[in-house]
Structures are given as C-alpha cells and as structure tokens.
Amino acid sequence: MIKESPAIVQGFLPPREILLEFIADNPDRSNKREIAKAFGLKGEARVELRDLLRDLEDEGLLQKSRKGLARPGALPPMTLLDITTRTTDGQLIARPSEWPEDAGVAPAVLVRQSSDARGKGKAPAANLGDRVLAKIFPAKEKGGPAYTARVVKIIDKLKNAALGVIRVLPDGDARLMPIDRRGEEMQISRQDLGDAKDGDLIEADVVRGRFGLPRAKVLTVLGSVATEKAISMIAIYAHGIPHVFPAQVMEAAAAAKPASMVKREDWRDVPLVTIDPADAKDHDDAVYAEPDPSPDNEGGVIVTVAIADVSYYVRTGSALDREALKRGNSVYFPDRVVPMLPERISNDLCSLREGEDRPAIAVRMVFSREGRKGSHTFHRIMMKSAAKLSYQQAQAAIDGKPDDKTGPLLEPILKPLWRAYEIMKRGRDRRQPLELDMPERKIVLKPDGTVDRVFVPERLDAHKLIEEMMIQANVAAAETLEKKRQPLIYRVHDAPSLSKQESLREFLATLGIAMAKGGQLRSNSFNGILAKAEDTPHQTMVNEMVLRSQSQAIYSPENIGHFGLNLLKYAHFTSPIRRYADLIVHRALVGSLGLGEGAITPEEEAQLDDIAAEISTFERRAMAAERDTINRLIAHHLAGRVGEEFEGRVAGVTKAGLFVALPTYGADGFVPVSTLGSDYFIYDESRQALIGEKHGLGYQLGDPVDVRLAEAIPLAGALRFEMLSEGRKMGIATRSFHKAGRRERRSGRAQPGTRPPRRGR
C-alpha cells in the first residue's frame, strides 16, 4: 500500500503544491475519486477539487493520462525501460525505451532489485543491457534519478551483442561502425572477422576491456549495406523486435490441425468475400450484406463481418501464445513482414482463403435505413470464402468495369455491400469522427531491393467500406463484452490535453481561424477547423497541427472511449492474426458467450492491465521501426543526389531549425538554424515559425521552400538540407524561445535530425 503524504489534512481541500506533490508521488491514485478519498473530501469540497484540477490542467501543470492525471513529461505508471549503466555503488540505472526527440534527455530511473512490494516474492532479476517492463515510482530523495522502478517482467535478456557495419583496415583488422549516433566504434581482429567483408552489416559479440576501444567478434553476417534489403534488418535489431520463431513455436504451429465443427454453426453457404490489398498474403476478415427482410426495418440492411478464429489455435499460455505476446503485433516493412504468428497459422489455417473451409467468429449487425445499429449477434462458425478480391478489383466492378471474376458477383454480392455502406455512412456522417487529410505514402521496391518509386495510394470507396464495417464490428464486440461484464482490453483514445488545445488555439489565431475554448471539445469541433482551412494555402499545415494536438491511442482495460472515432465503446476485434489485443477480445467473446474452446482464463483476466501496457509499448516499437526503415530507405535512395535541388515544404519547426518534407519522396530532412543566414532567428511557438530578429523574414510550418541536399546518411536515416528560399515577411515574433547563438554560427552546421514526432490515432 502506498503511504499517505504527511501533508494530507483530512476533510480540507489541499493547497495546489500539496495536491501536485500527491499526484506525482501516487500515480496509481491520481484520478479525482482517489484524490478525494485520500484527502477525505465530500460534498462541496469535491466540486472545489474538480475546479482546482481543471485550473491546474489549464495552466499546463497537469495533463490527463490513462490512469488519471499526471505531471507533464512524467513517466506512466508502467513503462518499458532499457537498463543502460550502473552507479558507482553498483545500482542499475535505466531510461525509457521510447522517448520523444523533442522532449530533451530521457529521465534516469533507479531500478530496485528488492522483493516485490506486494509481497509476492522476488522481482525478476534484471541486469545491465536488459529491456524490462517496470512499475514506476517518483524518487523520494532529491539529487538522484527522478524515478525508481520495480521490474515486473524482463522483455529481452542481456545480449552482449552489437549491430554495425564492417570497415576493413589496410592491415587486415577491422572496425565495427555503429548504425546510429549513440553507438560506439569497436575493433575486430582479422581472426574474428569470419566471412564478413567490407561493407557487411553484421551482429557481433562484444568484449569490453578496461582500456581502448571495445573488442568484438563477428557472430552473424546479415548482408551488405550496399543493398537496401539490409535496411529493415537494422530496424529489427535496433528496436529489439523478435523476428525468429523458436523451434518449440514452429513445432506447435506445424502440429496444429484444421478446426472441427464442434460448437460451430455451418455458414459455408453464406457468400462472404475478402477484400484486401492486391499483395495481401493473409486474409483475416470477410464481409457480406443483404437487405433486412423484417417489416419493422424497412430499407434497413444486415451486415455480416467474419473474422478468422485465431483463438481456437492460439490458447492462453501455449508456446504460440507466449511468442505472440512477446511480439504484440506484426511489423510491416517495405521488403518484409515480421509476423506475430508463424505462417502455418497466419497464412494458412487462419487465413480466410477462397473456396476453403475456415473457422471464424462472425457478427451479424442490423442497421436501419438511417444508419443506426439496432442489434447485433455473435456466432462461432465454419465459413468458405466465395471470392478473394483486391480493393481495386472490387471498386472497378462497382464503377462499371467488372472482370471475369467480379462480373458474376456484382449483383448478388458487391452491389448489396455498397448499398449497406451508403447506409452505414449516414451513421458515420452523423457521428462525425475526426477526418484528418494526411495521406500515407507507400514505397515500392525493385526486385533487387532498391527503391523504385514512392506514391500516395488512391483512397477508394472500397477502402472506406471495409474500414467502416470493421469499426462497427469492433464497437459490437466492446458492447457485447461490456454488457456481459466481461473484462477486456479496449482501444482508447483520450481527448487532447488542455495545454495542447491552447497551443493549437494560439497557432490557429495567427491564421485567423477561431477555436472554441473549454475542455469539452468533440472530434467534430476539429472537423470544423479543418473545413475552414480546406482549399487554402494553410490546409496541410492545419491538418498537421491538429494531428499533433491529439493524444496517442493505446490499449487499456479501463474504458475512456475513443475521441478520434467519436465512440463511447471500442475494442479491436477484427485483426487477431496481426494484433494480440484482438486475440484477447476473441477469447473474451468465446468465454462470455459460451462458444466453446479457447476462452479467456481467470489468470489472463488478472493480467490485462500489464498486457495492455506491454502491447501498447510494442505497438509504438513497431511504428518506430517502420518509420526508421522508411527514413533509411529514402536516405539510401537519395544518397547519390547530394547537391541536387528539391521542392519541399516546412513540415516542422523547432528552436534548433526546420524540418523540410519532400512530398515526392515522403522524406523529411533538417535545416539547422545556424545555416539560415546572418540574422538571429527567434522561435515563435504560437505561429510555429522561425523569424529573423532584424529583418522580420522567416519560415512557417507549411511554407513551400526550395532546398539543396547537403548530406545524406543512410544508416541513420538522416538528410540535411541547405535552404535556398528566402524567408517571407512575417513581422516581429510574439514569443521568443531561442536565438541562434554564436557557438552554433561558428560550427556552421548541425547533425542531421530525425523527422518531428507524430502521434497516431
């Protein structure tokens, strides 16, 4: 039990300083109810507490977190840590595995190696180099690390290994060059090189001596960095993504047998179809729609979504389950996929292949002609996909260009699906989820692994149809489990914090766009802002700033709703092949509805809080690895074009300089503030601009600019640009956060940066 602060006086509203101290010291008790209980507040005092907490939020001294309230920049109660060093007396020091580039130095965390605070025995024994999931506590003593931590689970044990590129020296020995700026150079003797050649990407065993460079021995040759096929491998190793299935897991997958009909409904005559990307290898969802024959729902439709029954094959605590949880999700790179489950499961037994019997969990949803969902039911079924279609193929058929395959499906299957989507879209339009216009770029590789082209895929109605049907199936899963009082993992998305709202409001004011004040903004409030910016020079800039104002969606056993989708109840159900959260929801449905084998267990229910924290962290890990790979691929692609000029736009503004995006390539590069000119440049946060103090010329987020590529570092995924465009007249900066200093001007350059952080929905 957490000790009460000695400053607590029961029954009286605490001073601001005492309240902030209590929240910092007790992250698990930081919601309004727990705070009121701790201070013994009742009646009118609770109302005063609510107002005080709102004031502290408005001032930016508190922000909402998954558990309640937290100090800005504070670590969450459960955090993934990398143990990096020891103190002089041997205690372990860790830092957060993921930390925003623009948030400064990640805080140090003292790892406690003592017994479990809940009296359940010793905590897992961690060591230098380990990655751990840990419970975080603010440090009581001043002058040391800001936090202490208790290890809950060791994610990756110590590997005395490093990843780098071989550089062979004239004498036959070699150097191991690090793949990122934080790494260190190592020496490798010729007898320890093995088959590695100059330019090879290798994994090495590290021997740290007392003097000189660390020594290393080649363990594995991963390929030449001269080919871009090695690029994704760098991200896999750098982010610690498990990519090789243990023998026990592969044996379990090979031994899996096709599902039986026990406790299943036979739906093999229902003409469900899969609609996926043309290059998809696994198919975990199928759809079908038909008019509702009920006279009470004239003009309504019945939409059926069937999802691969992964829970039948991957049982709680099995080798397959342990490995799936360790991975958390599949990770997608331009040249490969690191799957959550072995191919025998993901691409065969659980893939809803055309014309083959496959087990699934299906939901039938009834919608009125206005797009309101009236009811839904879940079924454990055996199905047989009537057709495997691509998005483009299905869309072409609807647009009047059917092929030999879609022609016979047009009237009985495709047109009813589009009719159902038109009805569901009425409900979506009424709900008004956040509608950001941020096109995703796709990289196409040549057979040799080099970049062929970068393009923005066309957004088709076929994409929107499948997306809306999956969203409604996810809603139905959450509603059913909540009605059954069944613990589950929700997909939650909190509203933007008041401090972020205020920053966005100040920025929009510089463009003459008004934004309402108050903490009760809804997603359609942001849609109004986006509408005002549509078809103006500021459209991209406003979309970018609205995106940055949003919180990050996470997994949680506690429901706070999904702000972006404007939904009160939402859980991921539709992709159990590639997301562990969906597998949990499937098990919960099987158990709560009595659908047979593969149900969630009481032990698993007790661990949902830890599981949600882990898979949220692994999702961020996957996103970072995917982003780093794209950055490295583009940097590799442009490395031979140093000195060329490009058209770009300002995609990020910091006190250190400008991030410039090249729309044609989907790449971001950095322009250091020290290279912008002879003026002193002031960072105006409200306008998201760098403005010259003397002449008033500057650069703002979204400005079109011409740049010259000055440097490309493929292994770091970094580009550095020189600005060719003169700044535009902007007047005087309203708030000064930075001046380009003399030291920076003397250096004449800065290290290439990474792209500005983005928050996913």
Image (cartoon, grey):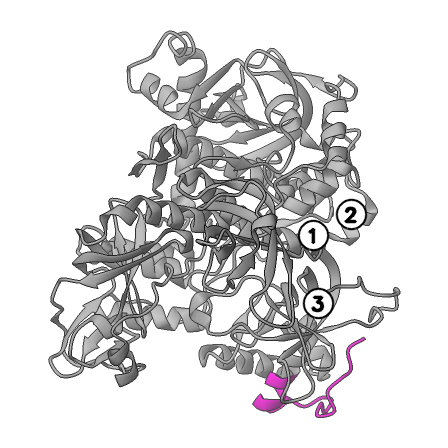
Amino acid on which disc 3 is placed = Lys
Q: Residue at x 57, y 28 (%)?
A: 284
Q: Say left or right for 134 vs 173.
A: right
Are discs 1 and 2 less than 8 Å apart at CB? yes
**Alpha-carbon span between mark 2 and mark 3:** 19 Å
Q: Nearer the viewer, residue 166 or 623?
A: 166
Query: SS class of the residue under badge 3?
Result: strand
> What residue did someone put label 2 on?
604
Mark 3 nearby-residue class (10 Å; few <14, some 14–19, many ≥20): many
Asked whether residue 70 is in view, the answer is yes
Query: SS class of the residue under badge 2?
Result: helix
In this picture, which residue range is highlighted in magenta? Answer: 1-21
Amino acid on which disc 1 is placed = Ile
Q: Say left or right for 708 vs 350.
A: left
> What residue did someone put label 3 on?
135
> What residue did someone put label 1 on?
611
Q: Mark on residue 722?
A: none
Q: Say left or right for 473 vs 1.
A: left
**Along the polypeptide, which appears first: circle 1 or circle 2?**
2
Residue 446, image quadrant: top left
Mark 2 nearby-residue class (10 Å; few <14, some 14–19, many ≥20): some
**Alpha-carbon span between mark 1 and mark 2:** 9 Å
Q: Nearer the viewer, residue 267 or 635?
A: 635
Asked whether residue 687 is in view, the answer is no
Q: Nearer the viewer, residue 541 or 489?
A: 541
User: How far across and how far down the image is residue 385, in percent?
Assistant: 56, 16
In the rendered image, the vertical position of residue 244 relative to residue 25, given as above or below:
above
